[in-house]
Amino acid sequence: MLLSMTGFGKTTCEVENKKLTIEIKSLNSKQLDLNSRVPANYRDREMEIRNILSNRLIRGKVDFTMYSETGNTDAPTEINTDVVKTYCKQLSQIADELKIGAADVLSIAMRLPDAMKTGHEEINDEDWKTISNAIEDAANQLIAFRKQEGIALADDIANRIYNIQNLLAQVPQYETARIDRIKERIRKDLNEFIKTENINQDRFEQEMIFYIEKLDITEEKVRLANHCKYFLDTMRQEAQGRQLGFIAQEMGREINTLGSKANDSELQKIVVCMKDELEKIKEQILNVL
């Protein structure tokens, strides 16, 4: 089953007098790129949060946000005296330099950053268990979102693989006529420069066979068919985005070689259609976990 790297999860929990809201967003990325924003009181648990997310989400550009709403309006808050004094002193100096009134300096200073402070609250084990369970729940929601997105991705990619297989199945009907056209074109070009009676027919046939063997596409057809089958088998596993990308590269090599050997307009049309389907597959794989 394919999993998308795109996902979203959100949950809430309550600890003591606070309501915590946890959100996790995920987009595609080559590696796990984890950004976290947590309240200051929970910074000492940030490494544990990152461990939970890295074990569950594996890959992607992940944004983790946790913010709190205080339920108790009587929670102790203190004025950061040293910071406010510094603000007032600097504001007064600026007012003197500009020769303007220094009215309401204290009011302005109290609205500046860090003018108020709250005491650091330690998170006990029981509260942390509640928070970690909420994080797990948000991660589960995100994974469920990834699975749902993965179903749509799998359907689209599989259909494009089937299209390539169907195009490959059309190749044999043009092969015999293609060889005859190549032989005729070579014979015609040769006759324009050399008289027919001066051509050693046995040697000509030997050289023709040698040249046609170089244009044989049997190996490319077999390999491409195997790559398509392997691709579909790999899609049934989890966390296989990188592997699918590698298989798609190998498919591209076989399609390109088939195109370079084609020497036929009908086969070239098939090759162009194959390349178009493969490019769309590669775009979709970028979002596969």
Image: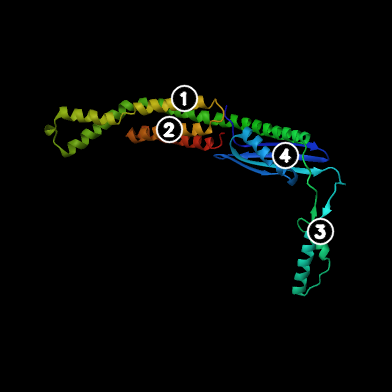
At which x and y percent is residue 226? 43, 25
Mark 4 vs mark 1: which is more N-terminal? 4
Q: Residue 111 bears which disc, if any?
A: none
- Residue at mark 1 to residue at mark 2: CA–CA distance: 13 Å
Q: Of the residues under marks 2 and 4, which one precedes in the sequence? A: 4
Give the number of the mark in front: 1 or 3: 3
Q: Mark 3 points at which residue?
A: 81
Q: Which of marks 3 and 4 is nearer the N terminus?
A: 4
Foreground disc of the pair 2, 3: 3
Task: Say which of marks 3 and 4 sits in front.
Answer: 3
Q: In which quarter of the image is the C terminus?
A: top right
Q: What residue type is labelled 3?
A: Thr
Secondary structure state at the residue bearing disc 2: helix
Kind of residue indicated by mark 1: Lys
Q: Estimate the x, y position of residue 239 in percent, counting from the top left.
A: 56, 30
Cα separation between marks 3 and 4: 33 Å
Q: Which of marks 2 and 3 is nearer the N terminus?
A: 3
Q: In this view, does 171 lie above or below 59?
A: above
* Residue highlighted by disc 4: 22
Q: Mark 2 points at which residue?
A: 250
Residue lying furthest right:
74
Q: At 41% from the left edge and 36% from the top edge, which residue is drawn?
A: 272
**Camera-nearest label, 4 or 1:** 4
Instruction: From the image, tell me which residue sits under label 1.
Output: 229
